[in-house]
Image (spheres, rainbow, N blue to C red):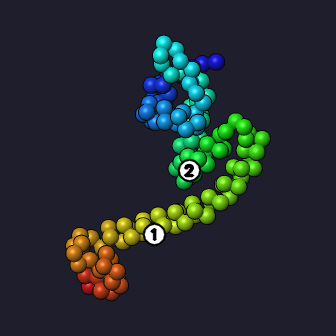
């Protein structure tokens, strides 16, 4: 089995070595073996870190992720993952909608072009009819 030094694993996954040590301390990564005082993880740790990062970006807590990765719960991990993911989907849908609205607001500001933040009707909540940007009145 191929092993990666902490620096190499950190480079491959785009994290600092301190983040990997933190994940290890939380039990998200299995304890690294030591070679010459350096932490060494099996190459499969790269995939595990990718899963951790995906789950974090999706809003899962570190405790939830640890529960999913716990070797003592591997038989129930599939059911546990399904339950967590089912609960997480509505939160992700809400975040997507919020981002869609934010994107629309930024696009409206670009279209307006007034760049007068003190009196911009888009930023003060005024209706489009009250807005005095170029081409708006």
Which residue occupies the foreground of this view, 52 or 109? 52
Is residue 6 left or right of 85 when viewed as pictured?
Answer: left
Where does label 2 land, which residue? 61
- The image quadrant of residue 108 is bottom left
- Residue 7 visible to the viewer: yes
User: Which residue was labeled with disc 1?
Assistant: 101
Q: Determine the image quadrant of residue 132.
A: bottom left
Q: Nearer the viewer, mark 1 or mark 2?
A: 2
Residue at position x 58%, y 27% in the image: 31
Q: Is residue 79 above or below residue 38?
A: below
| Number of numbered discs visible in the structure rendering | 2
Q: Dividing the image into 4 quarters, which one contains the C terminus?
A: bottom left
SS at mark 1 in the image? helix
Disc 2 is placed on an element classified as loop
Q: What residue lies at 31% left-to-right and 75% top-to-bottom?
A: 123
Q: Quadrant of residue 122?
A: bottom left
Residue 5 in percent (x, y) is at 50, 21
Residue extending furthest toward the bottom: 129
Vertical placement of 106 versus 45: above or below?
A: below
In front of the other: 73 or 17: 73
């Amino acid at each position: 089995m191929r092993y990666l030094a902490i620096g190499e694993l950190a480079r491959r996954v785009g994290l600092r070595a301190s983040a990997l040590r933190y994940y290890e301390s939380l039990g998200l990564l299995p304890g690294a073996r030591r070679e010459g005082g350096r932490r060494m993880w099996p190459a499969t740790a790269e995939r595990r870190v990718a899963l951790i990062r995906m789950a974090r970006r999706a809003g899962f807590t570190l405790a939830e992720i640890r529960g999913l990765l716990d070797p003592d719960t591997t038989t129930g991990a599939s059911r546990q993952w399904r339950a967590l993911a089912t609960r997480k989907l509505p939160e992700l849908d809400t975040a997507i909608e919020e981002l869609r609205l934010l994107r629309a607001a930024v696009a409206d500001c670009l279209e307006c072009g007034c760049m007068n933040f003190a009196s911009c009707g888009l930023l003060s909540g005024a209706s489009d009819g009250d807005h005095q940007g170029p081409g708006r009145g």
